[in-house]
Image (tube, rainbow, N blue to C red):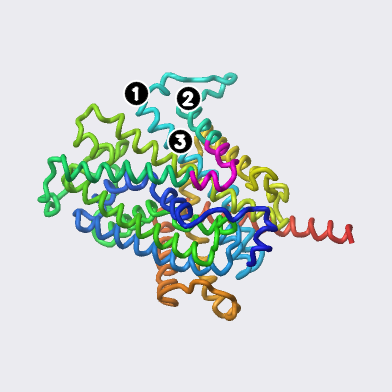
Amino acid sequence: MSSTERNRSGLIPALGLVAATSMIVCNIVGQGIFLKTRAMTCNVGTPEWVLGIWIAAGILALCGALTFAELGAMMPESGGPYAWLREGYGPLAAFSYGWMIFFVGAPSSIAALGAGSAIFFDALSGGALDNVEIRFGAHLLLSGVQIFAVLMIAVVSAVNCLPVRTNGLVATGLTILKISLIGGLVVASFAIGHGDWGHFGASGLAGSCAGVAASARGGAGGIAAAMIGALYAYNGWPSLTYISAEIKDPGRTIPRAITSAVIIVIALYVLVNTAYFFMLSPQMIASIAPTSSVGVELVRSLLGRSSAGLAAAIVFASVTATLHVVILTYARITNAFARDGSFFPWLGRTSEWSRVPVRAVVVQGALAAALALFGSFDALSNYSVFNLWVFFALAATTIFVFRRTLPNRDRPYRAWGYPFIPAVFVAVAAWILITATLAAPLQSVIGVAIVAASVPVYVFLAGVYRGRARQQS
């Protein structure tokens, strides 16, 4: 897409390599690195296996990143996968993706992060939010955590209404803060921690692993569960392609930023998990309560039981940074979806002042706030994971379609390892979907139903817009 065509969207290409890379790192590194190692240890049993799973999941994310890098550089349109699906498989496939993001993917992800920030702020403040309650009428009682979650969503959404250049600087600053805090934990673990490299040879988790099903401990089932947990922690790697229209020199910047960010995160995750197992034995990690996290226990082991506030502050900063980028990137998908004229066209407009899709930011923030208030975001988050991976796989297959149907299209970057690397990614995505369906068939059916509901809506709206076009002609 030419720069002229990109500017028709009203969005301004203002993000360079550093800001683009920061966006991805900031999006990927959220709660997962602090929460998933405990369950993964229960799944596979030993530190060596856990580290191997983190590396394998990172390589799979890198396969997806290399695939999406070619697609994003070739077709740098706002919304990323939305544009590829529209071009590769037609407007219905794109509409279904936009529908899923608008009603499930964006609001549930934002609500979950808002709630996470509230929970960790409550821990940081010594439970101050626990004493806050507001009652509306006889049936609605809002807790301090719910109220704070909504306030966080509102404040971060307001920041995202500023020009994208400003938000790029915010994302860069938050990423530097996040990596500095996490990196500081790693350095402190090896510099002042009283750890033991002998933990890496330990095994045996008897009596531990509360809440981890026996079917997900050991063997193929355990490996699959650990992989899914690690891949959750790598979520966010495609986010730069959602804002392709706002990237400077996208043909060069998108591939470099995506691959650099994923490699940085792989290295960071391996270092953090090495620090976990240096400081804490596998038995200790597996025995951590599901309501706590390995990150919190690491800080406590370094600085004592009174340091829980510091641990909460680190996780709060990490979650807030991710919330900022998630709001920014998902709004661009909704904006592209609406700009096609098939769904609430007014959401496709950008602010004349900031050149940002303010309406999309505000509406998705309102939907997320509603989920955070009424507490249904946990279930929807589970459904959105399934739906997101359906479209990750489908979007990745467009690389094969475009190589055949658009052989002469300018490709500033060609995916390394094609067709093997994209095929591996699609195959693994299919494996994740099959595993998720077998593990939670009801959630998978509901996830499919949410997407299927888009078909009659699309048919109806298409008829409405055709009728309007005939009347205007």
Residue extent of the magenta highlight? 156-169
Left or right: 28 as drawn, with respect to 77: left
| Magenta-colored stretch includes residue 162 | yes
| Magenta-colored stretch includes residue 301 | no
Q: Looking at the image, which residue is at 59% across and 58% down?
A: 245
Q: Amino acid at mark 1?
A: Gly
Choose mark 1 or mark 2, whichever is in front: 1
Main SS, magenta residues: helix
User: Which element carries disc 1, helix, strand or loop?
Assistant: loop
Q: Name the N-terminal-most of marks 3 and 2.
A: 3
Please provide percent x and percent y for residue 83. Answer: 61, 63
Would you identify the image quadrant in which residue 31 lies?
Answer: top left
Q: Looking at the image, which residue is at 28% across and 30% down?
A: 308
Q: Is residue 340 visible?
A: yes
Q: Amino acid at mark 3?
A: Ala
Q: Looking at the image, which residue is at 44% across and 39% down?
A: 320
Which mark, by number, is residue 126? 1
CB within 8 Å, label 3 to label 2: no
CB within 8 Å, label 1 to label 2: no
Which mark, by number, is residue 114? none
Is residue 359 positioned above or below 245 on the image?
Answer: above
Location of the C terminus by quadrant is bottom right
> Which residue corresponds to mark 2?
143
Q: Nearer the viewer, residue 164 or 129?
A: 164
Q: Is residue 97 visible?
A: no
Q: Nearer the viewer, residue 416 or 421?
A: 416
> Which residue corresponds to mark 3?
115
